[in-house]
Every structure is written in structure tokens, then in C-alpha cells.
Amino acid sequence: MTRSYFRGYPIIRTNERWVYEDTGETIDIVRPCKKCGELFQADDIDPCLGELPGVENACCGHGVSERAYIKFESGVIVRGFPTIQYTERGKSHNQALDQTQKDAQVS
């Protein structure tokens, strides 16, 4: 059995499909982010992080920090963060992310 995470929830692969480990429901069933409780919108921007300048896409890990990543417009990808600070819902940011972005721009 293959295990992974989907927006913070443990999932397993059974019968050629991914399902939530706790209920067996398919991951097509929309759940809010496990960490902040916000739902993803049609634009698929991580609701925990919101839009980040200079970032192509990013994921906070939704409570699983080693799954977090940032892909900068420069192509630099940074994976895993020790902590994510949640401030205002949907507009959250992390001081470590800000510093990482500055470091990537210098490189």
C-alpha cells in the first residue's frame, strides 16, 4: 500500500485511486487545509500562504512541514521548512520564507 499526503491529510492508494486514510473517501472530495481550515479556490493558490511576489508556486505543507516547498520565478526550488507561522488567514507568510526569497534573488 502506498501512502502520501494531500493538503495535510494522510492518503493511501487503493484499487488504482487515492483515498483519505481516515474515511476511505476519494481525494476528489474537497477538504479544507488541515492546518488553517481554509478551502482552496479555483486558482489553486495555497490559502495558508496567499500570493507571494516572485514565487511561481508554493505549498506550506498544511501541517506537514517537510512537504512544504517554494518554486521561485527564477527556477530555484526550496523544499521543507522547520516552521510555518500563520498570521492572518489567507494572507499568511513566514519570515523564513521572506528571507529565503531574498536569498534566491541574490543567487
Image: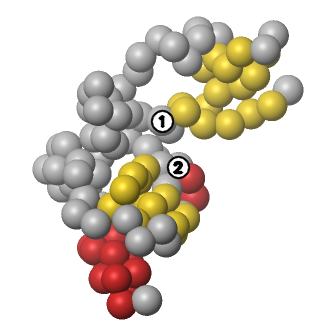
Tell me the quarter of the picture where residue 13 sits.
top right
Relative vertical location of residue 54 with respect to residue 1 in this rendering, above or below: below
CA distance for labels 2 and 1: 9 Å
How far across and down, in percent of the image, does residue 63 sit?
46, 47
Taking 80 as reference, is 86 left or right?
left
Using a 10 Å C-alpha cutoff, classify the residue at mark 1 as few (fewer than 14 neighbours), some (14 to 19) or many (20 or more). Answer: many
The residue shown at (33%, 43%) is: 46
Quarter occupied by the N terminus: top right
The answer to whether residue 81 of the structure is visible from this angle is no
How far across and down, in percent of the image, does residue 72 sit?
40, 66
Element under label 2?
loop
Tell me the quarter of the picture where residue 25 sits.
top right
Q: Residue furthest front?
A: 74
The answer to whether residue 51 of the structure is visible from this angle is yes
Relative vertical location of residue 105 with respect to residue 8 in this rendering, above or below: below
How far across and down, in percent of the image, does residue 74 sit?
41, 71
Depth check, front residue: 65 or 104 = 104
Residue receiving disc 2: 64
Residue receiving disc 1: 7
The residue shown at (28%, 74%) is: 98
Depth check, front residue: 1 or 75 = 75
The residue shown at (47%, 12%) is: 29
